[in-house]
Image: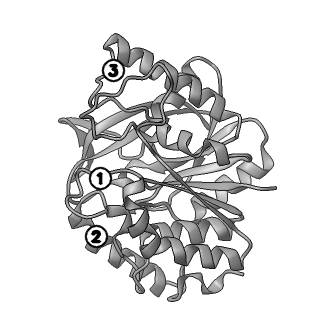
Amino acid sequence: MNTSLIIMAAGIGSRFGTGIKQLEPVGLHEEIIMDYSIHDAIEAGFNKIIIIIRKDIEEDFKKRIGNRIESICEKVGVEVVYCFQDMKNVPENAHILADRTKPLGTGHAVLAAAPYITEPFCVINADDYYGKKSFKLIHEFLVDDGSDYCMAGFILKNTLSENGSVTRGICDVDEGYLKAVHETKNIVKIQNGAEADGKKLNPEAYVSMNMWGLTEKYIRLLKEGFEQFFDEMNKGTVDPMKGEYLLPNHIDKLLKAGKCRVKVLPTDDKWFGVTYKEDKEGVVQSFRRLIDEGVYKEELYSDLG
């Protein structure tokens, strides 16, 4: 059965500062976080990689990872596809302000990949490390289940940055299924757990890290939601300069309308990523530990094929 990994790599990363955070080297041989995700996805059984980027980073992207990944994937029979998240790719009813620079969100990113989605898929952020277990769980679910969606359920305390606040989708879960996603900003690590804007949070709560297992049928619902997003923008209920069409928000609306079911696949893998410049050194050390522990080879892709 064919399955795709969709990597959202078009974000700007406003909290990161200068440079392109998706392309920051973190491995022993200049690998970036995306290298490890692609490795783990291929190992889990995914046989198509769809990478969403911006046109303005295409050259840097191909120099840093794209050309290398294409060569590696060709050797193991995995297809690689590129597509571009473009502000011009919007519905007819959409009106984008000429001076808006902020991307339209993760839902819009996945729609950029829609022409290439012909099979169940997993979607992830480019700058997040998810761990091997998460890819295996989602791939097994996509192959074995034909109707429901799924989400890798990370534990909040395992997803926090030491260097500043983060945004997480805090989840309500009942009998293993997602009931709601609460997009929560300004989450910071504190001595006994986590808080957001002074309100304490349950550090053991499930959170969405934008790692979803979806089917090709989801794309129709995503397109319908995108049109509704612009209807709301035209009515003034969505900020035309900063409003974003986000996957967790869209899936939350589908859940409330009874239009889907999402199985939560618990994982105790520890997330890490480069939300802030200061996060990079910790990420570098984390990958070195994983190599020392034998989780990865020093030559990352040498154990594939």
- Please give the residue where the numbered disc 3 appears in the rendered image: 238
- Please give the residue where the numbered disc 1 appears in the rendered image: 13
Give the left or right position of residue 90, taking residue 157 as reference.
right
- Residue in view at x 54 percent, y 86 percent: 297
Q: Amino acid at mark 2?
A: Lys
Residue 235 percent across, percent down from the top left:
35, 10
Residue 142 appears in the figure? yes
Q: Secondary structure at mark 2?
A: helix
Q: Nearer the N terminus, badge 2 or badge 3?
A: 3
Q: Is residue 158 above or below residue 32?
A: above
Q: Secondary structure at mark 1?
A: loop
Residue 218: quarter of image: top right
Q: Is residue 166 above or below residue 304?
A: above
Instruction: Please state which of residues 273 and 191 is positioned toward the viewer in this rendering.
Output: 273
Q: Nearer the viewer, mark 1 or mark 2?
A: 1
Instruction: Please state which of residues 148 and 267 is positioned toward the viewer in this rendering.
Output: 148
Point out the image quarter for the N terminus: bottom right
Q: Which mark is residue 280?
A: 2
- Residue in view at x 43 percent, y 32 percent: 245
Q: Is residue 122 above or below residue 40?
A: above
Q: Secondary structure at mark 3?
A: loop
Residue 102: quarter of image: top left
**Cβ atoms under marks 3 and 1 closer than 8 Å:** no
Q: Amino acid at mark 1?
A: Gly
Give the left or right position of residue 54, taking residue 186 as reference.
right
Residue 12 percent across, percent down from the top left:
31, 51
